[in-house]
Image (cartoon, rainbow, N blue to C red):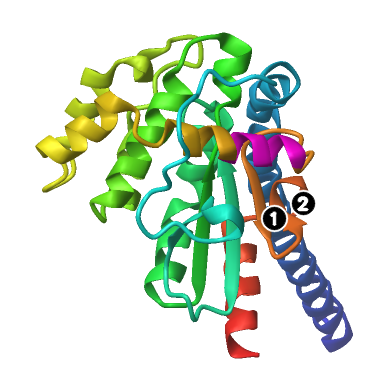
Amino acid sequence: MSEKNREGKRAARDRLAAQREKQKSAEKRRRGMIVGAAIICVLALATVGGLLAANAGKKSSASGPTIGPSGATGKDGLAIPVGKEAARSTLTVWEDFRCPACKVFETVYRPTLRELVDAGKLKVEYHLVTLIDGNMGGSGSLHAANAAACAQDAGKFKAYHDVLYDNQPKETEDTFADHAKLIGLAGKVGGLDTPTFQKCVKDGTHNGWVKKSNDAFEKGHFTGTPTVLLGDKNIIEDRTMTPAKLKQLVEAAHKS
């Protein structure tokens, strides 16, 4: 074989190897796009329940005085903050504990949010609403939100918040309407199941506050739950958003 032929074959092999590397890179990018799109699609599909509730659930069964939980902040004291006040970025989450889409968001984003909050780079402000009660009937959204506010009084909101989502019933089942169920779940959070917490849950101490929060959601003309705002941007509507991208945005703001 001549030197010219050997060089030609080497060049062909090099071109083939380069083409394979390009294909591998393209496939890797494609898989990444599929994962990101899948997350958004699951959230979008699950949000249908919240969207229907937003249209149907214009009335709340909550009543009584407005007694906000300890440490509530924001306009009219309707936000439950998690994280350091000095964090450069704030994520505003409007959620319903009966909402399947809210659980999807929690499942996908919780590890990233926890990491950013623990690092002091992000503060999350939770707003509790009762859309599913209005759409499906019942009072589970209201009672769960009140119980979460009672947990906030005890300084254990986030832990109980996570327990509620980890034990979320089917959207059609009003399991959280049962005070005994909510109190039983408090047993999964160390030091929360106390007589004070139990009384707060049974009395519906924060029901009026939950109603006021739900009213604020409706006045905000949001389309469904979860509504998740980073600044003024609803990240649920961003089809390119992933936990990794959110982390990049928060860390960039932290460094600026």
| In-image side of 86 versus 28 (left or right) | left
Judging from the image, what secondary structure is the residue with disc 1 in?
Answer: loop
Are discs 1 and 2 less than 8 Å apart at CB?
A: yes
The amino acid at mark 1 is Met
Residue 188 x, y percent position in the rendering = 17, 38
Residue 195 x/y as whole percent: 11, 36
Which residues are the magenta region? 213-219
Picture quadrant where residue 88 is located: bottom right
Residue drawn at point x = 71 percent, y = 64 percent: 25
Label ID, residue 241:
1
Residue toward you, 129 or 26:
129
Q: Is residue 18 left or right of residue 255?
A: right
From the viewer's side, name the closer residue of 133 and 35.
133
**What secondary structure characterizes most of the magenta part?**
helix
- SS for callout 2: loop
Indicate the quadrant containing the C terminus: top left, top right, bottom left or bottom right. bottom right
Q: Is residue 218 magenta?
A: yes
Which residue bears the numbered disc 2? 238
Q: Amino acid at mark 2?
A: Asp
Q: Residue at x 38, y 34 (%)?
A: 146
Residue 103 in sight from this viewpoint: no
